[in-house]
């Protein structure tokens, strides 16, 4: 089975299809999929249900799904890793909202992966998702403030529909989703993403954790963490005004030289040169 791994904070796909472009697959990110028009069937974690225009699907990191399109369908898909909702670039949101979203996503995906009820505010959701799609096609920027706040508006609309209560206390019931979420939240503290600490936190042996993580994501834990740190560094270099020293401090590197060595090893270019090329 294909496993789609995303390291970008957010990605958006807007397309119309008569045949779904991928076989049944899993992924490591969250996805909000909205159907603007068309009909068919959606198979999620072995359960098949019909879909039509106005339906929305909220998927988590360990879900496996595929669409069986019966009538040409127009999709907007917003794909993001959870840390994106805490703010990207120079855009930050309040801690209370962050904590709410953390719990809300876990609850919504576990209890309500699909929203198909007629009472759902389909017109507003259709407009919001189209706005996100248009803005992404114009800018392709992970740090777009407009996309950031439109995404939060989408989640707020879902929240209002589901009338979720007590989401702030939702726990990590899905183990791989919990591990990925924990890594994303603690990437700034290297000691917390060591395999020994993760194994202790999730009550697993180090050997089992390593094998379990690779089986579920298709990459080793070490490689996943390294790729994610690289993505964050690239994001800061390209879209923020942080100095290399500030980025090193934020991401838990011992000093600027440590970050430079790490980045150069994986990208074969120094961070300062990378920034010059990307911002020229």
Image (cartoon, grey):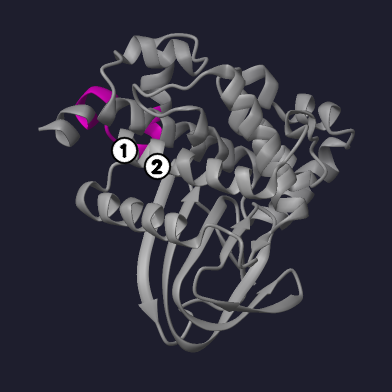
Can you give x and y, in whole percent of width and height, for residue 243 in the image? Answer: 29, 13
Q: Is residue 185 left or right of residue 245?
A: right
- Residue placed at 32% from the left, 33% from the top? 145
Can you give x and y, in whole percent of width and height, for residue 125 in the image? Answer: 46, 56
Between the C-alphas of marks 1 and 2, the distance is 6 Å
Q: Is residue 117 visible?
A: yes
Residue numbers of the magenta segment: 263-274
The quarter of the rendered structure image containing the N terminus is bottom right
Can you give x and y, in whole percent of width and height, for residue 186 in the image? Answer: 62, 24
40 in relation to 159, above or below: below
- Numbered disc 2: secondary structure: helix
- Numbered disc 1: secondary structure: helix
92 in relation to 277, above or below: above
Choose between 97 and 22: the one closer to the eye.
97
114 in relation to 69, above or below: above
Choose between 42 and 276: the one closer to the eye.
42
Tell me which secondary structure the magenta stretch mostly adopts: helix
Look at the numbered discs 1 and 2 and tell me whether their residues touch, using CB distance below 8 Å: yes
Q: Which mark is residue 146?
A: 1
> Magenta stretch: residue 234 in it?
no
- Residue placed at 62% from the left, 38% from the top? 222
Q: Which residue is mark 2?
A: 150
């Amino acid at each position: 089975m294909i496993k789609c791994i995303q390291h970008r904070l957010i990605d958006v796909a807007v397309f119309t299809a008569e045949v779904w472009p991928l076989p049944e697959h899993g992924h490591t990110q969250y996805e909000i999929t909205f159907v603007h028009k068309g009909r068919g069937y959606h198979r999620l974690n072995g359960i098949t249900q019909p879909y039509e225009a106005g339906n929305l699907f909220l998927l988590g990191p360990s879900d496996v799904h595929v669409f069986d399109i019966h009538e040409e369908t127009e999709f907007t898909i917003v794909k993001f890793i959870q840390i994106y909702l805490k703010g990207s670039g120079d855009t930050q949101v309040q801690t209370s909202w962050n904590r709410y979203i953390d719990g809300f996503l876990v609850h919504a995906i576990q209890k309500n992966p699909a929203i198909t009820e007629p009472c759902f505010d389909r017109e507003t959701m259709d407009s919001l998702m189209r706005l996100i799609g248009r803005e992404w096609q114009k800018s392709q920027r992970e740090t777009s403030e407009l996309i950031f706040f439109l995404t939060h508006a989408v989640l707020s609309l879902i929240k209002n529909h589901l009338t979720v209560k007590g989401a702030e206390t939702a726990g990590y019931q899905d183990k791989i989703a919990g591990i990925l979420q924990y890594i994303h939240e603690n990437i700034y503290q290297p000691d917390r993403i060591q395999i020994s600490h993760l194994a202790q936190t999730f009550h697993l042996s180090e050997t089992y954790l390593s094998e379990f993580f690779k089986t579920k994501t298709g990459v080793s834990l070490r490689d996943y963490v390294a790729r994610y740190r690289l993505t964050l560094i690239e994001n800061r270099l390209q879209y923020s005004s942080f100095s290399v020293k500030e980025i090193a401090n934020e991401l838990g590197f011992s000093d600027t030289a440590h970050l430079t060595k790490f980045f150069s090893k994986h990208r074969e270019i120094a961070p300062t040169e990378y920034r010059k090329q990307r911002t020229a």
